[in-house]
Image (spheres, rainbow, N blue to C red):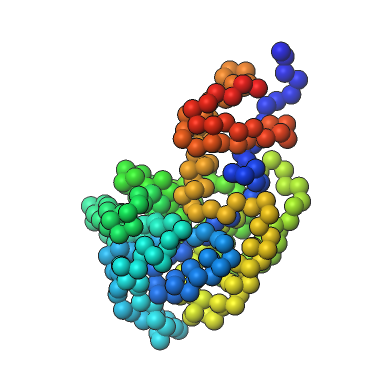
Amino acid sequence: MKRTQALIDMIVFPGGYTKAFTMSYDDGTVHDRRFVELLNRYRIKGTFNLNSGIFGLQRKGVGPNTDLDISVIQEEEVRTLYEGHEIAGHGSVHASPTDVGTPAFMFETIEDKEKLEEVTGKMVRGYAYPFGAFNEDVKKILKLAGYHYARVVDTTGKFDIPQDFLEWRGTAHHNDPKLMELAEEFCRNDFFGFRKKLFYVWGHSYEFEGDGTWDKIEAFLKFMDEHREGIWFASNIEIVDYVNAYRSLEYSADGNMIYNPTAIPVTFARYRKNYTVQPGETLYL
C-alpha cells in the first residue's frame, strides 16, 4: 500500500505518559536524611550521587557557610536510607575528573563503582561529574567502566531529552528563581508539539539547610505530587534505559514492521495512536 504521509513515530513514556520527571542530588551529606523523607512523602524518586571513599567524613562548609554541617552519611545507612531510589557514582573522593590525570581518574572511578555496588548490592550505572568537569577522554573512561549516563552542572531551562546521556544537562538547579514557573509550565496540559517533556532538577541537600529553603523545596515537591497525573516519576537510570530502548527499535524498509531487541516494553505514538512493542516482539502495523 502506498503511503500518503510521512511516518513520524514519537516516544511515549511508560504508562502512556507524555511527561517524565526526575531529580539528582550529590555528595551524600547528612541532609539527605531529611530530603529523602520528603521525597518519600510526596512519592517522588531521586538519584543520589555518592562518594564511597569518604563515607562518615565529618566536615564543615566553606565560604559564607563555615558553620554548616556537611558531614557525609555513614556507609551502613546507605541501603536503608536510599531504598526505592537510585545510587549513582560521583567519584571515590570527589576529585576533578579533568585535573587528576587519566590513570588516577580511572582508579577513582572504578574504585567508587566497585565500593558502591558492594554497599548497595546493586549495579551502579550512572554518574555525576564532580565539579561538573569532563572532556571526551573522561566520557570514554566512564563508558568503558560501564556507566550509561553522566550529569553535568549546566542547565537548559528546557524539557528536552538529551541526545548524549554522557553530557546530560538538567532543566534547572533547585535554586533557579524560575523553578516554580518551570514546574507550572511542565505540568500544564497544553499542546507542545512532537517532543515529550522531561523535567530534570538537581542540587545538593545541604543547600536547603544553608540557604534556609526547606520550605521552598517541600512546596515544589508537593506541587509536583498534586499534579502527577500524566507524569512518569522515575530515577535517572530508568529514563536512560527506556529512552535507549526506544532508540534501539528496528524498522523494516517500509516502516510497518517494528522489532524490539531490548528487554524493555517500549511505547511509541504514530498518527496520535499509541503502540507498545514487547521485548523480542515484532509489531506489524
Q: Quadrant of the C terminus?
A: top right
Residue in the picture at 38% in, 49% down: 125
Say if residue 99 shows up in the picture: no
Q: What residue is at 76 percent from the left and 47 percent from the top?
A: 191
Pick the front one: 45 or 84: 84
Does any portion of residue 31 appear in the rendered image?
yes
Q: Nearer the viewer, residue 233 or 168?
A: 233
**Side (left or right) of 265 relative to 89:** right
Q: Is 217 above or below relative to 2?
A: below
The image shows a total of numbered marks equal to 0
Q: Residue furthest top?
A: 1
Q: Residue at x 39, y 81 (%)?
A: 69
Rendered view: 271 above or below 163: above
* Position of the N terminus by quadrant: top right
Q: Residue 109's spot in the image, x, y percent?
A: 29, 54
Where is residue 144? Give x, y as percent: 32, 43
Q: Residue at x 39, y 72 (%)?
A: 29
Quick check: 62 above or below 133?
A: below
Whether 64 is drawn above or below 101: the answer is below
Q: Is residue 92 left or right of residue 24?
A: left
Which image quadrant is residue 73 in?
bottom left
Q: Position of residue 13 (x, y in %)?
A: 60, 44
The answer to whether 120 appears left or right of 238 in the picture is: left
- In the rendering, at what x and y percent does residue 54 appear? 29, 69
